[in-house]
Amino acid sequence: MSTAPHILVIDDEAQILRALKTILGEKDFKVSTAPTGEEGMALAAANPPDIVILDLGLPHMDGFEVCRRLREWTQCPIIVLSVRESERDKVAALDSGADDYLVKPFGIEELLARVRVALRHAGTAKGSKQTKVTAGPIAIDLAWHIVTLNGEEVKLTATEYKLLAYLAANAGRVLTHQAILTHVWDPADADHVEYLRVYMRQLRKKLEADPERPEYMITEPGVGYRFLAD
Amino acid sequence: MRRSSFVSEFLFHYIPAIFSIGVTTALLFWLRDFLDTPLIALLYLLPVGVSASAWGLGAGIIAALSAFLSFNYFFIVPNFTLTVHSASDLVVLFVFLVVAVVISQLVGRARAGQAMAVEQARLTEIASRTKVLEESDRMKSALLSSVSHELRTPLSTIKAAATSLRSGEVNWESEARKELLEAIEDETDHLNLLVGNLLNMSRIEANALKPERQWNLLSEIVGTVIARLHHAPEEHRIIVSIPEDLPLVPVDFVQMEQVFTNLINNSFKYAPTGTTVRISAQKNGVDEIQARVENQSPPVPEEDLERIFDKFHRITAADRITGTGLGLSICKGIVEGHGGKIWAENLPDGFAIAFTLPLSMDGKQMPEPPLETET
């Protein structure tokens, strides 16, 4: 990228804003900060960012509201920050337009990984989509619908492939149970988490070295799944 | 004070008693042609008993005396005088008076006794509630002191590490630097776990757990827990033994994660280095599964097997083992919130915590996912 990506961080805690400004600044990002939802929205409107990091626990205008309002006029990726015991909030945020989430307290490597993935997906949304996705020994050809493990083809059922393809097309990003069920099955099946559990297990058995401790098809507790590609 | 109480006694207790005798007398006088002396005597006992019961011992005695006088005046020959001509009438009168007084006494005392019993019960309830509050205060102090200690320990490590890194006394490329930074990161995770425990405990106390139940693979939950463990796996062997055909369970993923995390961490804490921790699950009849976390730690005394699930219970001396003592009570709260049971067992070569989980949610078992064949 010719210009450094512009990150807008909206969080009511001054310490976090300061720390993120320093750290992200070091990593060659241009960082704007805002302590409230209103200010954040104003800054975003005046100077559209490439990515927004938004705390869900904002006072006054809460994170969901900011998310919804931003989505009314921008498709830039939004990563929400939340606390651990609020899976419902995370799912709600993801369903109302956020692209990913981070649980406080988070490590900076995790944050950077999420930011990179979000920016990459935002980039490919405008350009051509990736047709080949690799994750360690796993290779997925989305154009020819071929999946190999260590070079050898793996036989998947139609649904198994559809599920894997959806995960791979969104590699690095969290996908909620509802989003997966709606895309891979049917909007009417959005509540049938059991389908997802069974099929994820089948995929892991076919593709992961240790299905019980997957390296690439990761469970996001209470939220959904994430596919970690190279 | 005493004067007003006497006046109120008089007004509210004695006057009604006398009034009841008056009413009875009028009634009996009206029916006098159908009544004989003994019957009148018996009938007069009624208002006496009622007066004693309704208005107390004093009213009963007043009623007895008024009845005696009315009886004599209105019904004993010669009528409308207090003289008595017949000897048998005199006996009746005398016996009546004795019986009336005895009845008043008995009823009056019973009534007083009953009032005392009510008062006694009320005081006992206050005493037991006070005890409960005292116990609750004691536990809150115990919690506060335990929590302060627990928070200060990782904080001390973080401060020590951060200040030495800043002071420039540690060589920036050295192994020591890496270790100090690692210590800071580990202790913040530890603090995070602690805060999570406290939050869970307060939710359990307030009955605010509300598990968000979804169909889940227990092996997936256990796998996630193990993937997130930090150091201790290096010192213990972990075996997971969950059959593939174990039905999905309707549980809250994050809460069950907490249960397994606490049980496995406990195993690491109490089991000797190099020993095995085994996590297993199996179907228990049609309605439930039983999950177990077994380790090779020393057995727990039989009488403590239930107490270890109490808040703050520690089997060994508090200063040797870290932790707030909340882990097992949180497991209990979560398991019971799902409708299951949790208990501890001593094994021939170790110790186990086992718990059950129901297989149905809202009365329904898991629906069968649609099958398909390979392409």
Image (cartoon, rainbow, N blue to C red):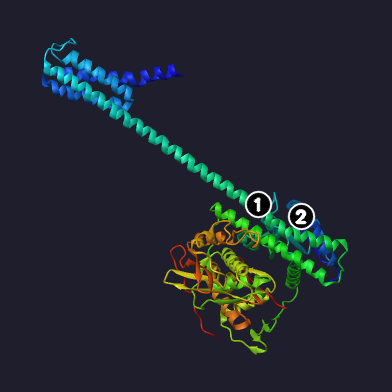
Left or right for B355, reference A132: left
Image quarter hosting the C terminus of chain A: bottom right
**From this viewpoint, is residue B296 visible?**
yes
Q: Which residue is mark 1?
A: B145
Q: Which residue is mark 2?
A: A40
Looking at the rendered structure, the secondary structure element under dot 1 is helix
Going 16% across and 17% down the picture, which residue do you hit?
B30
Measured as percent of width and height from the top left, residue B305 is found at 50, 63
**Callouts 1 and 2 in the same chain:** no
| B168 or B97: nearer the viewer | B97
Q: Name the kind of residue labelled 2 in the image.
A: Gly
Measured as percent of width and height from the top left, residue B252 is found at 55, 64
Dot 2, how many residues are within 10 Å of its Cα: few (below 14), some (14-19), or many (20+)?
A: many
- Chain letter belonging to callout 2: A
| B58 or B20: nearer the viewer | B58
Measured as percent of width and height from the top left, residue B135 is found at 55, 47
| B112 or B341: nearer the viewer | B112
| Numbered marks: total | 2
